[in-house]
Image: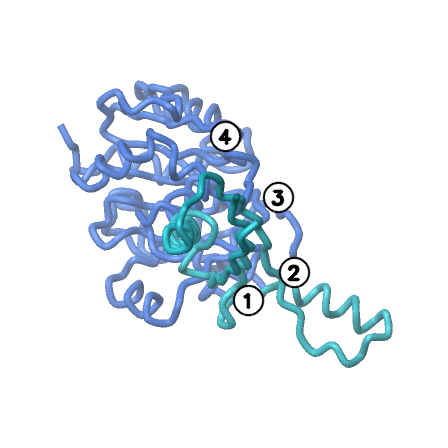
């Protein structure tokens, strides 16, 4: 399976994504500069974390206007798989490829820690090797990860089963205490209606090996490889 | 001649503003007990050159806010225009 990773000025998890896909999962990867428009024919696009454009204005707000994002939107519209991690999630929301927005963490602090997330939906190309309710230990590192959507949008997310992962405790209870950033309904990651675009604040790119404290991120990458949605 | 446009972007009332809440607590601790709410926003100044009509400047400023300066999911905006 071919992966492409758009690189923006200020991306800093592009190499984490490249490493996990190439070295841990053994898949070919193309790094694509944000000013290019050619995605290099991928099966899956990984929009990486970091601080694109220094987080100026709003996180992801400027990156969404990079030339490569038009290609990512076209690719997604054709059913191609797109996963956005952390700043990548913020960019996908700003670009309108995912609903809602990520605002300042409730406690204002930048959070860099391991969290537990519960897999709520397994019929997505990104979670199909997980069990429903499975708890994954995956790190977060963000200052603006507080997911917000208006009540109508929230209802739509629930009706369409788009809430894919939620913050929880080690036993899988999505409690207020286990919500690190104040996200609405403990939302850690969502997909679009067509289920081919997925964004999440936790980093499966930084949790592919036990050496890093957890290999649970591999469930996400294994799911992508196992998914039957191949664009070409 | 130019147009000076002052844009105010604010969080919608329904959106949590942890930064504003923290500033409010600080103000209360400083003794300003009457301050009941603080909402933080963004202020942007735009200078338009080239003798555009008022209607054109207004149209462009609206587009700029819709496309980039404000995120309609969470923010509202308003602006004032001044001929210089």
Is A218 or B77 nearer to us in this picture? B77
Task: Report helix, strand or loop for mark 1.
Answer: loop
Is B31 or A177 nearer to us in this picture? B31
> In the rendered image, which residue does mark 1 sit on?
B16
Looking at the image, is A230 positioned above or below residue A137? above
Q: CA distance from mark 4 to mark 2?
A: 25 Å
Instruction: Tell me how the rendering is colored.
Output: by chain
Looking at the image, is A79 positioned above or below residue B45? above
Q: Residues within 10 Å of mark 1 (few under 14, many from 20)?
A: some
The x, y position of residue A176, in whole percent, is 55, 67
- Front: mark 1 or 3: 1
Instruction: Say whether residue A165 is visible.
Output: no
Q: Chain of mark 2?
A: B
The tint chain B carries is cyan
- Front: mark 2 or 3: 2
Q: Are marks 4 and 3 on the same chain?
A: yes
Q: CA distance from mark 2 to mark 3?
A: 19 Å
The x, y position of residue B3, in whole percent, is 51, 49
B6 sits left or right of B34 in the view: left
Q: What residue is shown at x 47% (from left), y 41% (from top)?
A: A87
**Based on the displayed image, in which of its 4 quarters is residue A104 positioned?**
bottom right
The tint chain A carries is blue
> In the rendered image, which residue does mark 3 sit on?
A112
Q: Quadrant of the N terminus of chain A?
A: top left
Q: CA distance from mark 1 to mark 2?
A: 9 Å
Task: Report helix, strand or loop for mark 3.
Answer: strand
> In the rendered image, which residue does mark 4 sit on?
A11
Q: What residue is shown at x 50% (from left), y 34% (from top)?
A: A52
> In the rendered image, which residue does mark 2 sit on?
B19
Task: Report helix, strand or loop for mark 2.
Answer: helix
């Amino acid at each position: 399976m071919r992966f492409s990773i758009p690189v923006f000025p200020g991306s800093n998890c592009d190499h984490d994504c490249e490493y996990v896909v190439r070295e841990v999962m053994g898949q070919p990867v193309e790094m694509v500069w944000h000013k290019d428009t050619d995605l290099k024919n991928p099966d899956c696009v990984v929009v990486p974390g970091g601080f694109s454009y220094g987080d100026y204005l709003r996180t992801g707000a400027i990156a969404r206007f990079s030339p490569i994002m038009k290609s990512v939107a076209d690719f997604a519209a054709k059913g191609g798989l797109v996963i956005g991690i952390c700043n990548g999630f913020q960019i996908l929301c700003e670009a309108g490829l995912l609903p809602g927005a990520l605002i300042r963490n409730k406690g204002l602090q930048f959070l860099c820690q391991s969290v537990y997330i519960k897999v709520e939906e397994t019929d997505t190309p990104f979670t199909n090797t997980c069990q429903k309710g499975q708890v994954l230990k995956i790190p977060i590192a963000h200052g603006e990860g507080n997911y917000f959507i208006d009540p109508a949008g929230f209802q739509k997310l629930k009706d369409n089963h788009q809430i894919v992962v939620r913050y929880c405790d080690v036993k899988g209870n999505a409690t207020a205490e286990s919500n690190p950033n104040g996200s609405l309904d403990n939302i850690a990651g969502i997909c679009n209606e067509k289920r081919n675009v997925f964004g999440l604040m936790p980093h499966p790119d930084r949790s592919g090996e036990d050496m890093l404290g957890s290999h649970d991120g591999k469930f996400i990458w294994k799911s992508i490889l196992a998914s039957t949605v191949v664009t070409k | 001649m130019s147009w000076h446009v002052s844009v105010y972007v604010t969080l919608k009332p329904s959106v949590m503003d942890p930064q504003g809440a923290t500033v409010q607590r600080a103000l209360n601790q400083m003794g300003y007990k009457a301050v009941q709410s603080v909402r933080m926003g963004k202020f942007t100044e735009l200078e338009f050159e080239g003798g555009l009509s008022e209607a054109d400047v207004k149209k462009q400023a609206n587009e700029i806010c819709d496309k980039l300066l404000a995120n309609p999911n969470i923010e509202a905006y308003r602006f004032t225009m001044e001929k210089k």
